[in-house]
Amino acid sequence: MPELARLSVESKGDVELARVAGEVDASNVDDLSQRLLASVSNQARGLVIDLRETSYIDSSGISLIFDAAARLRNRRQELRLVVTPRSFVGEVLAAVSMEQSVAIDPALDEALRALGDSDSDSESA
Amino acid sequence: MTPDQTNRERTAPGALAAEEAVTRLEDVQRVTEATLAYLDLDDLLTELLDRVTDILDADTAAVLLVEDGGRTLAARAAKGLEEEVERRFRLPVGHGFAGRIALTREPLVIGDLERSRIKPVNPLFQEKGVRALLGVPLVVEGEVIGVLHVGTLTPREFQEGDVELLQLVADRVALSIERSRLMVQGQIAETLQRSLLPRKLPRVPGLRMAARYLPAAEQSAIGGDWYDVIELDSPCIGFVIGDVAGHGMAAATFMGQLRSAIGAYALDTMSPAEVLTKVASFSDRMHSRMATVIYATLNLTTWEVRFARAGHPYPLLLRADGSREYLTDVGGPPIGTGGRQAYEEQAITLSPGETLLLYTDGLIERRGRQLAEGEAALVEVAAGAPDEPELMCEAVTARLTEDNPPADDIAVLVVQTVGLHELLDVEVPAEPRQLATIRQLIRRWVEANGGGDDDCAAFAIAVSEACANAIEHAYGPQRAMIEVRASLVDGVAAVSIGDWGTWRQPRGGNRGRGIPIMREFMDDVSIERAERGTTVNLRRRLREER
């Protein structure tokens, strides 16, 4: 059975990049949340969640993002989202004013650059 | 002494033979009448033993039937030796008086037990003072199924005519016993058969299903046809239709095994071809009967049907545009025919309002008719049948069996996607894994009613949020279902989501966001909290009407 959502995580230098494809709802959000947080080491500077391939997200997925942002903030790590402007996911995020809590970029390199620029220690990425 | 015997003594030899022949005929007639008059085997045997003792002027009579696959004889009915049945007297075939008859299949006469070398095993003969015995085998189609014997309390030299008469009676008795057994087996087979069919079909959002099982008109022909609906991992569902060769208990029993095997393999692999390949190898290992079967899966988000076919009649697809076609691309031999067999699968996609009709050969096969004619008749009848699956099942089975009662079992399974402009009205289990299916269903409904992509997405999230709310509500074990109803009036789509839980104030950030999201995407959101549960009403004017 194909899963509703697929998660792939890779390291871009000291930033973790998580790509979420498919649909996120109450049926898979717990599993997704666990795997997402487990993928971020203490050494990582931050996490980028790429939602451009996410076709559906609901309030439980929104909660996951708020929750992840709060946890990372406690660990002095930053969360950024990559969302295609005017997409369905973008609309849902706008409906809950996500941009006031979490930075949203329209393209991946912007998000990676923003995280890289936020700390000048390393240019290895 | 009976009047008959008096007559016989007085008449001349030539006339005596003729007289005897007439009497014999009358005697046999009396026995035959009895076999026709009684349907219950015990009543029949009691009556027959009465008549036999009367005709042969005997004091005792008994019927013993073969059991244990031919190893034992057990008393089934007796007259003058009633205790034999009460004590459930049994003896091994080959032993004693009756045992010897069952073994040799020949009549046996003992003129005087006290002087015979054959020693009966049954102590009752001595207790009752039986002196003379005459026994014959009960034979059906070359098989000994039991022994019929009569006895007298005085020594008697049974005559050849007595032996012949008793054998004639025995043949009638044997046939009656066989008929009655088949009938009882038929009843058991039907009971077993029905117990193995799904009691009711699951409710699946976006689908309407109906099924029928019609036992063969002749009870001895019952057994072996089945259908099944298997709830696979969301969003898929499996369908089975099959027919085990042969009839009766054995066919019904094997059908049960096949049904379980398919159910188990279906959870193992999503490929219908693989499922059938495994089932075929399973039945080869069991050295089981032959069976034809179709196994199909339907994905409720893509509406793709994949199926594999093992020697079974073609599925009939009734398209929404009115065209009808048999799906003939893939096939393969029936399972249980030996040899390694890998099945192939065919895929089709169902649009809204399309119907897949699966059936067993009893529906289309008639004696003296080509199979192609039967297939054409089904297409014609299905084309004229009502769309509603229950009514369609009824119409198809009724029309195709109206000329003559079915000689074989018939099973029919109708699977239909909900119609284009039809009111969406479904009840789904209150489980998170149903959310994806509900969204797919509502998208499809909005699209079918002229909504654009934005409308589809808007309703998908709003309805899904409302359902997620319902799932989170304090649900007891009693009725964990969600009702989704949709209607379209003057371009405004309205969807209501009802549950039987008690509304809880949004907790934490999570549910607190569900309602704003609904409001963001809908023109109007209202929540009714009543004693019986909570209903969320969503409305939105469809923006892109075609």
Image (cartoon, coloured by chain):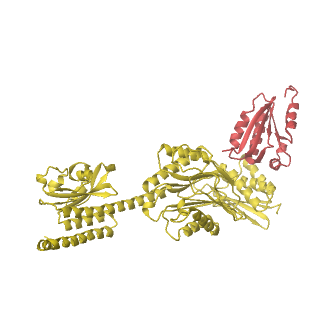
Q: Is residue B378 left or right of residue B57?
A: right
Q: Quadrant of the C terminus of chain B?
A: bottom right
- Residue furthest to the front: B14
Q: Colour of chain A?
A: red
From the viewer's perspective, is residue A1 above or below residue B6?
Answer: above
Q: Quadrant of the N terminus of chain B?
A: bottom left
In this view, the residue in front, B380 or B14, is B14
Q: Quadrant of residue B183?
A: bottom left
Q: Quadrant of residue A40?
A: top right
From the viewer's perspective, is residue B188 above or below residue A56?
Answer: below
Q: Residue at image x 50%, y 44%?
A: B284
> Could you tell me if residue B310 is visible in this image?
yes
In this view, the residue in front, B306 or B531, is B306
Q: Residue at image x 79%, y 29%?
A: A44
Q: Is residue B161 left or right of residue B222?
A: left
Chain identity for the colour yellow used in the image: B
Q: How many marks?
A: 0
From the viewer's perspective, is residue A69 above or below residue B178?
Answer: above
Q: Position of residue B192 (x, y in %)?
A: 45, 56
In this view, the residue in front, A89 or B49, is B49
Q: Position of residue A38 (x, y in %)?
A: 71, 33
Q: Position of residue B17 (x, y in %)?
A: 18, 70
> Could you tell me if residue B130 is visible in this image?
no
Q: Quadrant of residue A117?
A: top right
Q: Position of residue A104 (x, y in %)?
A: 85, 41
